[in-house]
Amino acid sequence: MIGAGLYTTSGFALSDLHSPFLVLLAWGIGGLLALCGAIAYGALATRFAQSGGEYLYLSKTLHPAAGSVAGVVSMIAGFTGAMAISALTFETCLLEIAGQKWSCPHGLIATAVIGFAAIQHLFRVRLGIQLQTAVVLMKLVLLVVFLLVAASLSPERWAGSLSSSSEQTDVSLAVFATSLMWITFSYCGFNAAIYCADEVQHPERTIPRAMLVGTAVVTLFYLLMNAVFVLAPPSEQIAGQQQIATIAARYVAGDHFAILMGFTIALSLYTSVSAMTLTGPRVYAKMADDGILPKIFRFQKDAPKAGILCQAVAAILIVHMASLQQLLTYLGFTLSVSAALSVGMLIWHSWKIREPKLNWWQTAASLIYVVTTLLIAYLSASRYPLESLWGLSTLVAGLILYGVRRREFS
């Protein structure tokens, strides 16, 4: 979960909302929404303890065509596009650390990061997972160090920062919803465990617990990190800036600490690329098993190698096609609609089948998630119609793929 969104979103949000407190409110609402989603996805994982994610859930509860749409959303937006965002942010972060010492073509470093992650998971699956775990732990330790250093700031430093914040807080609901959609993208990884359910022991118990505990911990962590990002430096220094984390680190403890923070961010972004390289091809393998994708996307020995390679190539293409803010808006809209549809089908499936029946808090969490997510997506689409049309075209592509593959098998 802790990836590019944490280190970039608040700068864009502050530029729109003009208030650090509104930004933190949006992060808190995003966390509550992610917790509702984790509860709902936990119920889905209990019913369908298999890999495949939204593709599997919608295929089983609504129609294989809906599953195909969700699978294409996962391929293009959920994994490939998200990998491109993390890799691009990695490149920007590394070049900022280097200053004027390095010069390279746009996208070259991002391409290398995606390629290395593909190699990591292509051959030795267990070794790749062990490396992923080690790097994540190292990242968390470094981020906790950042919080501890920030906590040592004198009260006068914090007071000066707060007094320099803009007093303009009159924003429209559509503007707030757009910032909230960017922020919900930062929480998107809360459901990543569902994509590897076939490879988890006791998935009906392990996966719901992992998602709920993980989401709660990350929500608290996000609030603490963003409190430093938007409250420590003066607002005019960070509003609209992409590298808000390194700017905050420089303000907290100087240039050397900003360099350390930059390396921490780069490490964090690589783990995001690596995690999506691991999980995404598992969805494609499930789609290949069901005939939606060609058989080449199935597992070869212990890894879905064709899926890993194709996903890496597609992510590299996206790196060279879109800006970071465009990607954030497109991915936030597309993934929100797909996730809301999956949770909505959970409610419908429970009402229709009645066994196993949702309890009251699972029902409440599911309803909150669906209604709020769709409302955010609608309000954001009214402000950024072009990126939303890209999202709708992705949904249509899923229907076209299903129609083509069905005709081949008929």
Image (cartoon, rainbow, N blue to C red):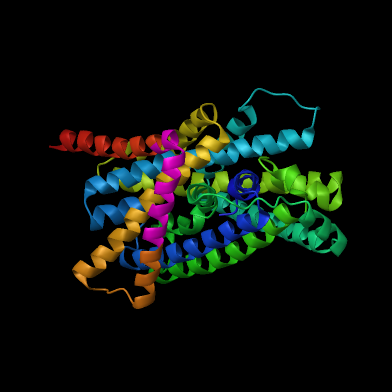
**In the rendered image, is residue 281 in sight?**
no
Tell whether position 363 is magenta: no
Q: Residue at x 33, y 48 (%)?
A: 286
Classify residue 348 as left or right of residue 132. left
Tell whether position 377 is magenta: yes
Prevailing SS of the magenta stretch: helix
Classify residue 392 as left or right of residue 302. left
User: At which x and y percent is residue 372?
Assistant: 41, 58
Q: Is the N terminus in the top left, top right, bottom left or bottom right quadrant?
A: bottom right
User: At which x and y percent is residue 110?
Assistant: 61, 33
> What segment is highlighted magenta in the picture?
369-388
**Nearest to the observer: residue 289 or residue 217:** 217
User: At which x and y percent is residue 331?
Assistant: 46, 42
Q: Is the C terminus in the top left, top right, bottom left or bottom right quadrant?
A: top left
Residue 15 occupies quadrant = top right
Residue 97 occupies quadrant = top right
**Nearest to the observer: residue 66 or residue 325:** 325
**In the rendered image, is residue 273 in sight?**
yes
Q: Residue at x 42, y 68 (%)?
A: 39
Q: Residue at x 58, y 63 (%)?
A: 219
User: At which x and y percent is residue 323?
Assistant: 56, 32
